[in-house]
Image: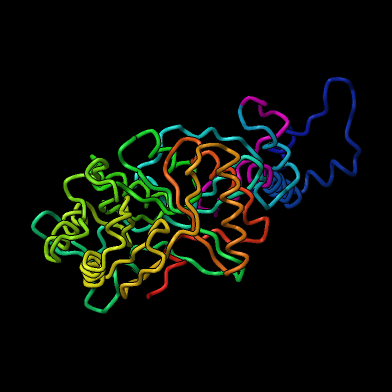
């Protein structure tokens, strides 16, 4: 208990001559009042400490700093204002990102990508296509992996095609071929064309599987080119594994299987040349039988439009770059649009010439704004 003697020095008047009122002196001299005053002082001090360091019962202390004292260099622009306004939603800013000229590898393509082309048209590659080979769709052959129909009946034509959902508009599709031999053109096709464009690769290409992997990582479905005998053979020779019009069936199948064993990840094949072979019943019957047994599609450049074979089929309405000029290619692309408007769908075929790649990229920016749906070639195939 506090005593009057102990409290007196603490409330002694200053030397200026001021003296506390007598009533106040009597209150302070009361030991109970003095104890209450000390307790009140303790509570006030405790509240001040809590205000500075936070609730001592919390898991960690809270440090309060004045926003006005934070240097502008210590935080990004707009940070102080966002906090001062008490915003609970993150601020959204628009920035420009410069993309590398080097395409991403298959393992780097994750999630959804949006590519904004010149003119503002955005292409969405929902997810990269699954890396090949898919389990259950290949078997080891004499020269490499060969496609097979899975145990559940699903075919490689179904498994390796780019997924597609029709929106009811006329469908337009393009196949760009001759890829894998020229690295610059191949990279340009993979990088600059929207993923709905189907890409076809030459089986003689070095590093063929790597190119196919990169194309599928960018969302492109893939065809493998099959060299076929042209009318002017051997002056125009597509290579040692050319399918010949008058060859025995087993020889045609053997050469076809060599082509198919070069890589995995394609949903079908397309012809390279073949003006003579495609008119041969003997050759085409063996060829179609080989594709049927392996569950593959056949997409041709228009020369085999009357051929069936019991496999998923599509034929190009036009070859878009028989004349290598901007105007000629644009006219052929417009003709494909007209064909889609008339028949509900139309396919075009082209080669990976620089001018072709440039014009197709420009065309693809705006084709959907004119009422069409850009589709992969597999979406136009029908079994016949």
Q: Is residue 251 above or below residue 167?
A: above
**Residue 206 visible:** yes
Looking at the picture, the colour scheme in use is rainbow
Q: Is residue 228 above or below residue 206?
A: below
Q: Is residue 211 left or right of residue 63?
A: left
User: Residue placed at 60% from the left, 71% from the top?
Assistant: 168
Magenta includes 266? no
The image quadrant of residue 278 is bottom left
- At which x and y percent is residue 320? 50, 48
- At which x and y percent is residue 6? 68, 37
**Residue 136 visible:** no
Number of marks present in the image shown:
0
- Relative to the observer, which residue lies in front, 37 or 145? 145
Q: Is residue 272 left or right of residue 66?
A: left
User: Residue placed at 22% from the left, 64% from the top?
Assistant: 283
- At which x and y percent is residue 116? 59, 44
User: Residue placed at 37% from the left, 75% from the top?
Assistant: 384
- Relative to the observer, which residue lies in front, 316 or 130? 316
Span highlighted in magenta in the image: 45-73
Q: Residue furthest front?
A: 232
Q: Residue furthest top?
A: 16
């Amino acid at each position: 208990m506090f005593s009057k003697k102990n409290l007196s020095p603490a409330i002694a008047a200053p030397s200026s001559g001021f003296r506390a009122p007598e009533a106040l002196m009597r209150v302070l001299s009361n030991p109970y009042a003095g104890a209450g005053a000390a307790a009140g002082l303790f509570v006030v001090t405790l509240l001040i400490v809590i205000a500075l360091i936070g609730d001592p019962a919390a898991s960690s202390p809270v440090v309060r700093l004045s926003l006005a004292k934070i240097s502008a260099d210590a935080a990004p622009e707009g940070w102080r204002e966002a906090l001062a306004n008490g915003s609970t939603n993150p601020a959204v800013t628009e920035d420009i990102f410069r993309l590398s000229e080097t395409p991403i590898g298959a393992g780097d393509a994750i999630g959804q990508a949006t590519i904004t082309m010149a003119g503002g048209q955005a292409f969405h590659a929902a997810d990269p296509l699954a890396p090949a080979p898919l389990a259950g769709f290949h078997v080891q052959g004499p020269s490499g992996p060969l496609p097979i129909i899975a145990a559940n009946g699903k075919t490689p034509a179904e498994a390796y095609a780019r997924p597609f959902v029709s929106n009811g508009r006329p469908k337009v599709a393009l196949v760009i071929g001759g890829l894998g031999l020229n690295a610059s053109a191949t990279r340009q096709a993979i990088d600059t064309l929207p993923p709905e464009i189907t890409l076809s690769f030459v089986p003689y290409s070095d590093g063929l599987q790597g190119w196919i992997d990169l194309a599928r990582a960018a969302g492109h479905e893939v065809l493998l080119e099959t060299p076929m005998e042209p009318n002017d053979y051997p002056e125009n020779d597509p290579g040692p594994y050319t399918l010949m019009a008058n060859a025995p069936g087993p020889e045609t199948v053997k050469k076809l299987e060599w082509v198919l064993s070069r890589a995995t990840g394609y949903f079908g094949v397309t012809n390279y040349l073949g003006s003579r072979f495609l008119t041969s019943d003997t050759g085409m019957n063996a060829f179609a039988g080989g594709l049927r047994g392996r569950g593959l599609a056949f997409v041709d450049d228009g020369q085999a439009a009357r051929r069936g074979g019991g496999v998923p089929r599509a034929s190009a309405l036009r070859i878009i770059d028989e004349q290598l000029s901007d105007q000629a290619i644009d006219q052929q692309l417009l003709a494909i649009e007209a064909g889609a408007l008339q028949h509900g769908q139309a396919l075009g075929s082209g080669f990976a010439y620089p001018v072709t790649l440039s014009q197709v990229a420009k065309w693809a920016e705006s084709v959907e704004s004119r009422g069409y749906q850009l589709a992969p070639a597999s979406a136009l195939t029908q079994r016949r």
